[in-house]
Image: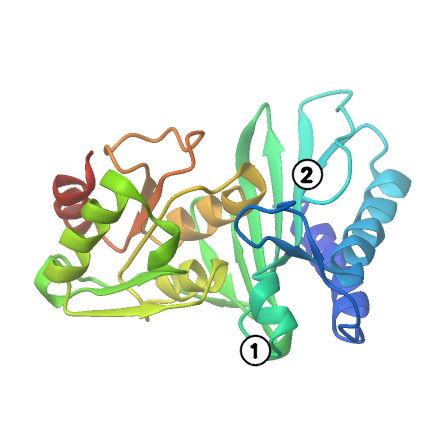
Amino acid sequence: MSFAAFASRLADAARAVTMLAAVREVEDKSKGGVFDPVTEADRGAEQAMRALIEAEHPDHGIAGEELADRPARGPWRWSLDPIDGTRSFICGLPTWTTLIALLEDGAPILGLIDAPRLDERYLGDGKHAWLNGDEIRTSTCRALAEARLSTTDPFLFGGVEAAAFTRLRAAARVTRYGHDAYGYARLAAGAIDLVAESGLKPHDYNALVPVIRGAGGVVGNWRGGRDLSEGQVLAAATPELFEQAVALLDC
């Protein structure tokens, strides 16, 4: 994990912006659709991370949520989401995160989920995962009836997706809402067993994959495959739980 220390430096640079930011103005990127907020802290944190990458790894590509992509001159590309959970950020809630991933030939091989307000940093390389330096593992939950399920907002689902999630929620033991990427972090740490979401973009999920898989969990789409490009993401603590969830979600 030669790039792990550098990823942590990127997270530190983002923290230096977001932890001191005051929410003064909020822009709606949706332009009249579903409210999609962005703040100066989002842009400032991404600019700070980009500056480090450009200075120390000028051949690496960069794909961030807020600014234009920079093509790679080689196999390496960084995926950046400076504030995942901007709705929580503007409401003064602590569960927003910064997401950083390193991709090799398009595949995420290193992921970092940083929760600055909680002082929690999750790191994974697909084989192992750590929280603040201590190794973590997913739970051993194998039965949907015993599962702790999470999604950010059930009202973001529509049509057949809404019906599919309703089936999943009815089968799970307990469901919690509102955590954005932090829900996946807590799944990696064994506190949540299952997360199902849709409409995600690469900067939303690239960092999650190496962390969850490194902790022993499973990440795929609602049909049970590994391709996340359609934005439907399902993460589970165990393969058995993943398969049970797919049986209800596949639509």
- Is residue 126 rendered to the left or right of residue 133? left
For mark 1, give the secondary structure.
loop
Residue 144 is drawn in which quadrant? bottom left
Of tags 1 and 2, the one toward the viewer is: 1
**Residue 40, x across and y down, in percent:** 80, 60
The residue depicted at 56 percent of the width and 70 percent of the height is 88
Q: Amino acid at mark 1?
A: Leu
Furthest residue in direction right, as rendered: 55
Specify which label sits upstream in the sequence, 1 or 2: 2
**Residue 67, x across and y down, in percent:** 77, 40
The residue depicted at 24 percent of the width and 34 percent of the height is 224
Residue 250 is drawn in which quadrant? top left
The Cα–Cα distance between marks 1 and 2, rounded to whole angstroms, is 27 Å
Furthest residue in direction front, as rendered: 32
Q: For mark 1, what is the residue? A: 93
The residue depicted at 82 percent of the width and 36 percent of the height is 57
Q: For mark 2, what is the residue? A: 78
- Is residue 199 rendered to the left or right of residue 83? left
Residue situated in front as seen by the camera: 137 or 81: 81
The colour scheme used here is rainbow
Q: Amino acid at mark 2?
A: Trp
Q: Label 1 crowding class (10 Å Cα cut-off): few <14, some 14-19, many 20+?
A: few
**Residue 172, x across and y down, in percent:** 15, 63
The residue depicted at 87 percent of the width and 46 percent of the height is 51
Residue 78 is drawn in which quadrant? top right
Q: Label 2 crowding class (10 Å Cα cut-off): few <14, some 14-19, many 20+?
A: many
Furthest residue in direction top, as rendered: 73
Pick the quarter of the image with the C terminus.
top left
